[in-house]
Amino acid sequence: MIAVIGLALGIVVGLVVSPDVPPALQPYLPIAVVAALDALFGGVRAQLEGKFNDRVFITSFLSNVLVAALLVFLGDQLGVGSQLSTAVIVVLGIRIFSNAASIRRLIFKA
Amino acid sequence: MWQRPDASMTLLREVTDHPLDPAYEEAARRREISGAPHRTWLTQAVVFLLAVALGLGLVAATQVLRAPQSVRNQARDVLIEQITDRQTRQTELMAANADLSQQVRDLTAEQLTASDPAMTEQLQRLALASGVEAVSGPAYVVTLSDSAQAQEDPTTYPEELVQALDLQVVVNALWQAGAEAVGVNGVRVSASGAIRGAGSALFVDLVPVSSPYEVVAIGPVDAMRSAMARSSASTHLALLRDRYHIGVGTGTRQEEWLPGVRTTQPRFATVVPDPADDTGDTGQTGQTGTSGGTPTTEGGAQ
């Protein structure tokens, strides 16, 4: 619960302050946001299944974002940046979809 | 050993069957075994702070991603501003340049009318022929414009754009027809200035011009019209109009004004110091060399 409150607080603070992101990080933002979405959906599903865990949520969130950014960075260095981004997006997209489907099943029982 | 029929698709199955992080399952199992985990206020605080930081980062990232259009626009605005600034400056400098060369000509004429009237007369004649002097008079006008579909989509119909060659043909035909001064879109064409194409842009005496191109020829209008009709340029224009849909128009003007040529810098000739004259006079005669030195061959607009 405390993680969700913290996340909400962070979002509110971010909306109010609107901090600047250093330009060097900007190429990694889209994929980091998708990774964060994946972690969020995973957290919601875990909550509905009664398995939610603050620490797991935070670590999965953090590692998802970092690993996604790292993959993009590696891909850029190797010259396959866009292909690797596509791969990450596809995997994360499938996960988001099936998590969303589970959430739907859990909420509507259908 | 039993094998699943979709054994070759382990990766896909893995992704679709277990989208939930295995960590959640594991944590749930651990809790079942050892009861609720012991939590200190420190771990709680760390989790809380990390969550705040992540939320903050998420919002920051989203906002940056939503805003790039405006950032790009800002950069473009700055560039546009710089271009306009430089263009204004260029116009100012060109005006100042024209002003100064006019002064030079006036002073030259002033000095020479007293000392050498014959030279003044020759200078004026040469200035007219070489295009140094701004002139006005009745004019015959040929207008060329890119075809309608080429104006909308120049990359698909590049052959329907007016080319440098088309302008060259028209200008040369006008010289042949007896034009005394020719200008394209207000830029004077002289023997020393070329009509060139660079990519999709056309340059007259290094000044960029764009469609519609208005070729103005000052001279005997009726003679020019009939000479143009008989020249090979008229077949060229007909071809442009019929096959390439390029807009071709002709007309006459009672009074048209053309500026002098932009540059009158001799490219090969250098001023010869005259040993007979004293130093005060040399400066003046040296400057007359500028306008007199321009070749007066007509029809050299290639």
Image: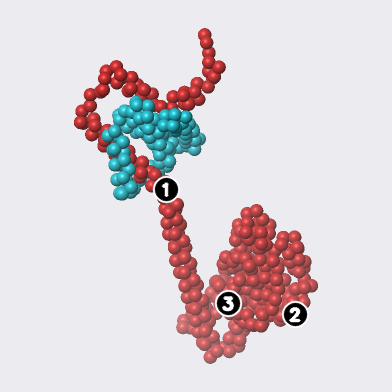
**Horizontal side of residue B42 vs B219, given as left or right:** left
Q: Is residue B207 visible?
A: yes
Secondary element under disc 1, as helix, strand or loop, is helix
Looking at marks 3 and 2 on the same chain, the residue that comes earlier in the sequence is marked by 2
Color style of the picture: by chain
Q: Position of residue B75 (x, y in %)?
A: 43, 55
The residue lying toward the viewer, choosing from B266 and B30, is B30
Tell which residue pokes out farthest to the right in this image.
B230
Q: Colour of chain B?
A: red
- Three-letter amino acid code at disc 3? Pro
Q: Residue B7: where, in percent of width, then height?
A: 53, 18
Colour for chain A in the figure: cyan
Q: Residue at x 46, y 24 (%)?
A: B17
Q: Position of residue A103 (x, y in %)?
A: 42, 31
Q: Secondary structure at mark 2?
A: helix
Kindly give the residue lying farthest to the bottom in the view shown. Answer: B114
**Labels 2 and 1 in the same subunit:** yes
**Alpha-carbon distance for marks 2 and 1?**
66 Å
The subunit carrying tag 3 is B
Residue in the image at 76% along x and 66% along y:
B238
Would you name the residue on which mark 1 appears?
Answer: B66
Label 3: few (<14), some (14–19) or many (≥20) C-alpha neighbours in 10 Å? some
> How far is disc 3 from disc 2 in space, using C-alphas?
23 Å
| Mark nearer the N terminus (3 vs 1) | 1
Left or right: B127 as drawn, with respect to A90: right
